[in-house]
Image (tube, rainbow, N blue to C red):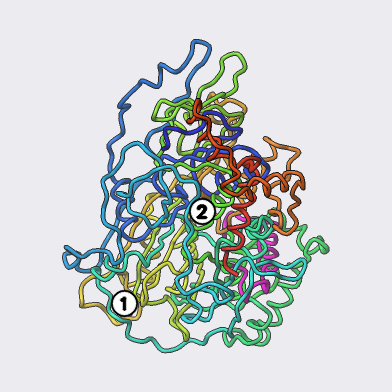
Amino acid sequence: MADNLPSEFEVVVLGTGLPESIVAAACARSGQRVLHVDSRNYYGGSWASFSFSGLLSWIKENQQKTDLGDECEDWKKLILEDEEAIPLSRKDKTIQHVEDFCFGDQDSAEGVEEAGALPKLPVLGASGAKGVSLESEKECPAVESPCPESREPEQGTGTEPAGATEGNGAGTTPGTESSPGESTLELGQTEAAPSETPTQEPKKITYSQIVREGRRFNIDLVSKLLFSRGLLIDLLIKSNVSRYAEFKNATRILAFREGRVEQVPCSRADVFNSRQLTMVEKRMLMKFLTFCLDYEQHPEEYQDHESSTFAQFLQTRKLTPSLQHFILHSIAMVSETESRTLEGLQATKKFLQCLGRYGNTPFLFPLYGQGEIPQCFCRLCAVFGGIYCLRHPVRCLVVDKASGRCKAIVDHFGQRISANYFIVEDSYLSESTCTNVCYRQISRAVLITDQSVLNTDPEQQVSILTVPPVELGKPAVCVIELCSSTMTCMKDTYLVHLTCPSTQTAREDLEPVVQKLFNVNAEKETENEELEKPKVLWAVYFNMRDSSGVEKNSYSGLPPNVYVCSGPDSALGNDCAVKQAETIFKEMFPTEEFCPPPPNPEDIIYDEDEIEREESGLSNPAETKPEPSAEGSSDGEAAVVTAPLEGFSAMKLLRLLFLVMMMLRPI
């Protein structure tokens, strides 16, 4: 049970978001004893993915304004005179302004049950969680979890990616061998860029169908893609965590210009096959992109414009307005009014360097959602001895007054757990600790639609679209559209994520963009222009705290051995989380390698003397076992039971577990 946790660890981690999970995995991999707990009953924190019913429960939870009072203060009796306590927050206050809308007949879903859902079980108020996956219901009981569950592909394993028969995007299967210097992610075949086809009548989807097929949805709280040469992909390959997940290519990059959605040519082949650009524009575009790949070698080309915005610099390059739009919003994807020339050139170069590694776009998306990535690192931590416990709130940090260092935590059972280092997710810190912190906000929207924003043949596309600011002072909006072959939504629907830095509430920031791209009218009588747009079946808006970039000294009274991990940022990639995790790990263990590759089971060298002792102990026949004496039968019986395990150390058990898991992994 969770209340019987060991009382001493090297590292205690609070929160299972992406940076915390990476740090936990790195610490366990370097041989540290790690306890990883979360007050929630699901992995991922603000990086989690939910089924549709799970998301509805999350919405209801975050719409409640009630603050949890301190039911019991017995834990304060555990604080000694030479110690002081730093109370932790009992409610996650990082989510605000949650509004959800159903654009169908919501009454038709009355009494409809989710297909394949487990029967509801009574809630246990104080325990961990065993095998909690992000699809599980809020009502699932939680007990101590030795290892996070990982979802197996529904379409089978091996080199064929799940859902490959449904779309033309190249999927990637982890754990396969590759040539030196290349990724261990194996690619499927990519097809040529799809051509635009006439709009077809979409299949009518009702709200009751969405509820019934709710377990086919894996809806991310944070919308991101993985750059094919980004820090997260490099870390997944280096640590061999990639074998726990599968990925799919983002198959196309779109642009919104003059009220229309267009496909942007990215690679050399796309540029010369494009019908949108004239021959002169194709040459101009290729010349500029070639310059961006090695712009550092030609400083004379941009030095005079370093103080200008990237948009102004593009105007000096004699590019047509359409090329300037494509480069600014769909390739560099930087702000039109704020990003300087060097920032735009760096973003363009990064985009171009990532092209061609896994397909015609620079991006990958994890099957079953972004929430799979934190779980993958949690699994690596568990394989190397990390202990996991969900639905396990922590009341406070215990600080030694003399040294000023944190020495322990007190959980909701009243148990003191000591450690040398403590990793805390930002949402766990109380308002008093965060008094001097100035947070930014992210506006998020998630839509379920009946068709794509740009219908093509084939239909299974993973698209990224940047919508320019609707008005002056507003940010650009990043739109990611996912098809059913990503295992994030049911067949004949699309899952659309909208993200931008907040200026107002999420609905006020994003609704104008939603109205430009989609039909949100529930009534049957709509104009012809609206009928051509995808119909929104369901939507949710919410604001999420962006704690990235907050310096540690901004928090009040935190000891030096307590490290804070931020939540998701508004950037498209995951570089911020990986950099933060590596920085924290290096501060704690400067001489250790960060997430080294796991050892090959064939290369593990066992001590010959120990092996001989184990073999001799395991090969003893039953009749040769010592008979228990009449005087001490209980001791003798214990000796008989434990004799075969003599010399079978915890390290050997760990190696055996590792070997078994390696044999069971997908080939």
Q: Is residue 577 visible?
A: no
Residue, disc 1: 530
Q: Quadrant of residue 210?
A: bottom left
Q: Is residue 224 left or right of residue 33?
A: left
Over which residues does the magenta segment extend? 335-363
Number of other residues with Cα within 10 Å of mark 1, as a class: few under 14, some 14 to 19, many 20 or more: some
Query: What SS does tag 2 mark?
Result: helix
Kindly report the distance in space between the C-alpha atoms of the residues bearing marks 2 and 1: 41 Å
Taking the spot 40% from the left edge, 56% from the top edge, the residue there is: 509
Name the residue type under label 1: Glu
Residue, disc 2: 375
Taking the spot 50% from the left edge, 72% from the top edge, the residue there is: 463
Of 218 and 565, the residue lying toward us: 218
Quarter of the picture containing the C terminus is bottom right
Q: Is residue 104 left or right of residue 459?
A: left
Name the residue type under label 2: Gln
Measuring from the top left, give residue 89's x and y in whole percent: 41, 32
